[in-house]
Image: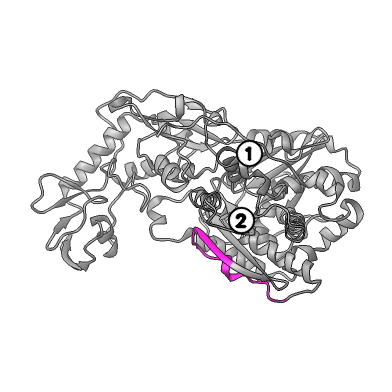
Amino acid sequence: MVNITIDGIKIQVPENITVLEAAKNVGIDIPTLCHLKDVNEIGDCRICLVEVEGARGFVTSCMQKVEEGMVIRTNTDKVIEARRNVLKLILSAHERKCLSCIRHGNCELQDLALKFGVTDVEFEGEISTKIVDDTSPSIVRNTAKCVLCRRCISTCKNVQKVGAIDCVNRGFESTISTAEHKSLQDVNCTFCGQCIQNCPTAALHEKENIDEVEAKLKDENTIVLVQTAPAVRVALGEEFDMPIGKNVTGKMVTALKRLGFDKVFDTNTGADFTIMEEATEFIDRVVNNKTLPMMTSCCPAWIRFIEMEYPEYLDCLSSCKSPHEMFGAILKSYYAQKEGIDPKNICVVSVMPCVAKKYERQKDEMINDDMYNVDIVITTRELAKMIRQANIDFTSLQDSNFDDPMGGASGAAAIFGTTGGVMEAALRTAQDLLTGEDLQEINFEEVRGKKGIKRATVKVNGKDIKVAVASGLGNARAIMEEIKSGKADYDFIEIMACPGGCVMGGGQPIKPAKLRRTVDVRKLRANALYSIDEKEVIRKSHQNPVLQQIYKEYLGKPNGEKAHELLHTHYSQKEKVKMSN
């Protein structure tokens, strides 16, 4: 411990922490722009400048370690003026079209300008060359909005271990770009969207599909069906200033009906189908000595990653489509037939916590009978935008239920939205199918929690099953390297591209870096999903009566011919240009 003084407050702090962390310990807020704890600690933006007695000039508090006897001043006139000048320099090269910006009202640069009263920039700089890359189905990149904080680079390179983007050129010509300045579509980007989550401005954002949805809603000849992923319901409320992790399922359903969707369904039903197919596939692999480990296939960013980085292991992937794609296929076949609707007149809209789902939706592998299983994907943020534009007072809405006959889902499906949830749901069903019993021990605590990699050995019908759960593509790479080197002998592996799982997906509400330093957003959202599971009467996918009926009337048996035709897919190696090291 060392003794320091911050703004006249004498405190003891650990000797290895930064001035920024020390200030936080006594409730003093030092503003930042480029800083992401343990991810991007480079001191580039200079917003966190402070005075240290005896030092020449200002110091960057996110980089400066505390020292014995240090006297720090964070709020002097000189510090405030220095920060204001730094902001003006950043803004002088920035495209300041704030009112029409997709991040208006949720932009860290805008917040800082308001905080420090920067309402005018008297020295105009040369505006950065505007390059808009909007050719990918998932992510738009706009260099005119970039502040060169490098948070996207650090996230992609250090957390996700993908490295699809980097800083090129020097000085004023510096820009964030891709290999050979190609589109994100043509490089090794996985569309996980974590760069969007960590961008402080609108330099990176999802490719919006709101206009397409609204056009379909206005078309009297189209029946528009909407489905919502489990993670959406525990995050959507945050867009309307409700508590983080608040379960707003009922209000969400009401809002969707107010927007004009003909039927509102639950992707959780699709998740139950996924478990039925996946658990059956896993049992078949174990019993008949087929390829192991089996790896989950729900996450499209992870699928794109393995197709590019580890194509030799594609046989390990479950052949199951993701839940919303399975459900889309069911809606355009079984549901259409049951309701007497021409499936060509159906538009399926998926509300997802993920921007990679936009990429997945348009893949050729997601076509049955010459129709895409899902027609449009919008994110949690896009749904919130639609609700606001329709002048719906979300917080005052009464609760509604999902529509029948496709509205039923199990508690197991709800936990799909958090890391470990797919694994736990699959194990619940696998152990029952193998034993022929309705086992009561269904909580697999070993695969829960925030750790990026979780390993466990679980008993299923007396057999030891070695499992691993990884969230974040950096952790996925670590697991794959274990397998490649022969150091691991897992039976079943769950992988989600986003750290923490879908609750922290690229399409979820964006939280400022300052808030994420003090609030465990992942935990609050995940806990809400576990709470949904615990309250459900049916907590195992195979016990869902909706599924039982559809298998009996239409699909036959899990992993059967009809189920494979509609609910399964295939994979292929993808070659993409990468950044040079």
**Quarter where residue 552 is shown:** bottom right
Residue 65 marker? none
Residue 358 marker? 1
Q: Dot 2: within a 10 Å radius of its alpha carbon, few (fewer than 14), some, or many (20 or more) residues?
A: many
**x and y, in percent, of residue 419 in the image:** 57, 58
Mark in front: 2 vs 1 = 2
Residue 494 marker? 2
Q: Can residue 262 be seen in this snapshot?
A: yes
Q: Judge left or right: residue 165 versus residue 311.
A: left
74 inside magenta stretch: no
The vertical placement of 384 against 365, above or below, is below
Q: Secondary structure at mark 1?
A: helix
Magenta stretch, residue numbers: 440-456
**x and y, in percent, of residue 83 in the image:** 24, 43
**Quarter where residue 7 is shown:** bottom left
Residue at figure coordinates x 73%, y 60% from the top left: 286
In this view, the residue farthest toward the bottom is 440
**Quarter where residue 245 is shown:** bottom right
- Name the colour scheme: one colour
Q: Say what amino acid the circle numbered 1 marks.
A: Lys
Q: Judge left or right: residue 564 versus residue 106.
A: right
Between the residue at mark 2 and the residue at mark 1, the CA separation in whole angstroms equals 21 Å
Q: Say what amino acid the circle numbered 2 marks.
A: Glu
Q: Secondary structure at mark 2?
A: strand
Q: Can residue 331 be seen in this snapshot?
A: no
Q: Judge left or right: residue 218 versus residue 484.
A: right
**x and y, in percent, of residue 345 in the image:** 83, 36
452 inside magenta stretch: yes
Q: Earlier in the sequence, mark 2 or mark 1?
A: 1
The vertical placement of 323 against 86, above or below, is below
